[in-house]
Image: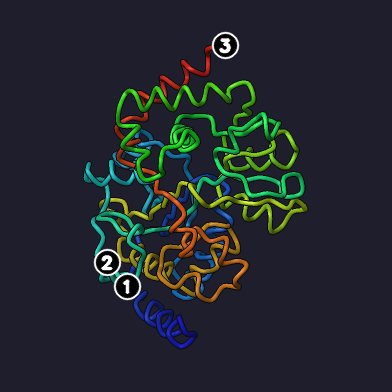
Amino acid sequence: MPARMLLAAVALLAASTSFAVARDLTVVSSGPDSIDPLRKVFVQAFTGATAIAVRQDSWDGGIETLESRLKTPDNAWDLVELRPAELAAACADGLLEKLDFSAIGGKDHYLAQGVSDCGVGAAASNIVLAWDRDKFPATPTWADFWDIAKYPGKRGLSHGPRGNLEIALIADGVAPGDVYKVLGSADGVDRAFHKLDQLKPYLVWWETGADAERILSSGDVLMTSAPSDRIAIAARNGPRNFGMQWTASFGEVQSWAIVKGSPNLRQAIQFLYFAGTPAIEGRLLDVAGASGLAKGANDLLPPELAATSPTSAANLAAATRFDGGFWRDNQAKLGQRFDAWLAQH
């Protein structure tokens, strides 16, 4: 967005803030590590432009946790960042406001994966294959990830079925576009677990993006699956020469949603309008390693930085989206099977 258009947008916001505020606008992001980047990219600039006070909070996710929180009479959340399954469940249960996209720039202002009835894209990140280029100069694939004989060393995967079953099937020759069709059958699930059996003695499990970065930095693993945002920041700011394989990575969009009945509805909409400004949203990649969903958010970035964006044209084309509906329906069942599989010697 040209500077004059950004200034006009800020002026419009500032001119429309002369109303009583019941309490500070509360913006709840995913995980405690998200608070500082959100403040740096959006909150400080938003408050400076509008004089609307913002209180930040974070949460660790979970549909049951969300529904319990939003149904309490003293709930103080206004805007909350949700994963696809959480967004779909809360929207279907009537816990979120239906968004009026005309008030935040229109649906065409955003990439398609950032638009839904109750949510607008907040940040995009991928689960990628990450490695240290100084130790492994080639660009590995998921098939190489499984090839312990050719590339000896430990491997890192997230502690849970989500993502790992998809990756296992791709390593076993399933086309990324067919992964969820295969996983939709009992034979497909068996095939994924059988593939994981091959790696089981060599696996190091991570719980968070920080864990994935740590086991790669320490040399505990030769390669690992990892959140692209965490690896991008580590590669840019740290001593390690990390690489990321975008082909057959799995992308996911976190979305902003407004809690049903929020007394700060108008302020929340203003925040979304402001946060969706491409010139502002583009800063998210530099600060947090994730990318925004507004069209043009990558356009003003240096080419080397834009190349690490999950929403760049090349990286979008190379990736597959996580199927939130599949995991909403199958998380509990596959989680139990994963725990039983992990307990087996």
Q: Nearer the viewer, residue 9 or 316?
A: 316
Q: Amino acid at mark 3?
A: His
- Near mark 1 (Cα within 10 A), the count class, few <14, some 14-19 or many ≥20, is some
Q: Residue placed at 49% from the left, 26% from the top?
A: 195
Q: Which residue is mark 1?
A: 105
Q: Residue placed at 39% from the left, 48% from the top?
A: 321
Q: Nearer the viewer, residue 94 or 290?
A: 290
- Near mark 2 (Cα within 10 A), the count class, few <14, some 14-19 or many ≥20, is many
Q: Nearer the viewer, mark 3 or mark 1?
A: 3
Give coordinates of residue 291: x percent, y percent: 50, 61
Q: Which residue is mark 3?
A: 345
Residue 47 visible within the image? no
Q: Nearer the viewer, residue 267 or 102?
A: 102
Pointers 3 and 1 in contact (C-beta within 8 Å) = no
- Could you give the CA–CA distance between mark 3 and mark 2, rounded to whole angstroms? 52 Å
Pointers 2 and 1 in contact (C-beta within 8 Å) = yes
Q: Nearer the viewer, mark 3 or mark 2?
A: 3
Q: Amino acid at mark 2?
A: Phe
Check the picture and name the quadrant holding the N terminus: bottom left
Give coordinates of residue 62: x percent, y percent: 40, 36
Which type of secondary structure does the marked residue at label 3 adopt? loop
- Near mark 3 (Cα within 10 A), the count class, few <14, some 14-19 or many ≥20, is few
Q: Closer to the N terminus: mark 3 or mark 2?
A: 2
Q: Quadrant of residue 211?
A: top right
Check the picture and name the quadrant holding the C terminus: top right
Q: Nearer the viewer, residue 321 or 12?
A: 321
Give coordinates of residue 258: x percent, y percent: 32, 55
Residue 335 visible within the image? yes
